[in-house]
Amino acid sequence: MRSGHVFLTSCLFTLVGCGEPAQTPDVPASGGGESAAPVQPSPAKAWADRNFDERGDYMAKVVVPAMKDLFQRFDAARFADFGCVDCHGPNAQEVRFHMPNGLHPLDPRAMPMANAADPEVARWARFMSEEVKPRMTELLGATAFDPTTGQGFGCFGCHAMAPGTVPAP
Ligand code: HEC
Ligand code: HEC
């Protein structure tokens, strides 16, 4: 088995040479509304078909640059050093990048909403639901979470569930 440490240093600090073929967006960024970020390529290879190392490569080369841009535009100071740990937690390697991994637990019965009375909660909720979640869904080539089936990528693809809440089926 490959050491997580070697894996991280090879992909985190030298973003070239991780085996990911150069990706060029096949869709030009055309008048992306409020978003200045270019449209990101969907995975050249399906996420499910990638092995562990290939997933790490894709994260380093495609996911982190795209998400870093979003998070830094939301709060440049807070996310100045945006990287793997922001989503995967400081012990990412020990848990083999399993997600979710402790990121701000959310209560499915009391989700932060974009229309929350607290402007700070509303600001985060809007950013998460309108930018982070859809972009990550797109980057993974996933389908959006559908509450009727319980399938798809959603908030709980990244966030832990608050203790005492019933896990999604
Ligand atoms: C914006 C949040 C985010 C960032 C930043 C991020 N990841 Fe991920 N990563 C995820 C999510 C979400 C998954 C799980 C995707 C899925 O299968 O649903 C994941 C999955 C993975 C996996 C696959 C784990 C498995 O069990 O198959 C690896 C490996 C990985 N990430 C490595 C990294 C590395 C290395 C970095 C930094 C270069 C990184 N990630 C940065 C969100 C992130
Ligand atoms: C791709 C991964 C990802 C997805 C999907 C995601 N989030 Fe987040 N979320 C993050 C990260 C990273 C942070 C910043 C954590 C930090 O800096 O403390 C965050 C922060 C938050 C915060 C602020 C937490 C705090 O510390 O104040 C809230 C609230 C939140 N997310 C709600 C949501 C909701 C609701 C959804 C679904 C609509 C969602 N998130 C989807 C990664 C994600």
Image (spheres, grey):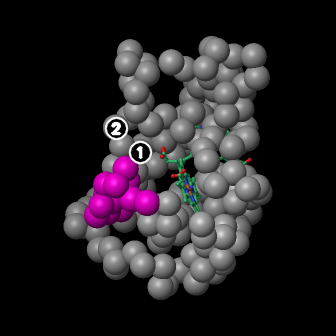
Residue 149 x, y percent position in the rendering: 37, 18
Question: From what the image shows, is residue 102 above or below residue 39?
Answer: above
Disc 1 under 8 Å from ligand 2? The reply is yes
Q: Which residues are magenta?
A: 39-51
Q: What secondary structure is marked by label 1?
A: helix
Quarter of the displayed picture in which ligand 2 can be seen: top right
Mark 2 secondary-structure assignment:
loop
Instruction: State which quadrant residue 112 falls in.
Output: top right
Going by the numbered disc 2, the residue's amino acid type is Thr
Question: Does the CB distance between marks 2 and 1 fall below 8 Å?
Answer: yes
Residues 3 and 80: in front is 3
92 with respect to 131 (left or right): right
Q: Which residue is mark 2?
A: 143
Does the segment drawn in magenta span residue 42?
Answer: yes
Q: Amino acid at mark 1?
A: Thr
Residue placed at 64% from the left, 55% from the top? 96
Q: Position of residue 163 (x, y in %)?
A: 76, 23
Name the residue rendered at 22%, 67% in the picture. Answer: 26
Position above or below: 35 against 60: above
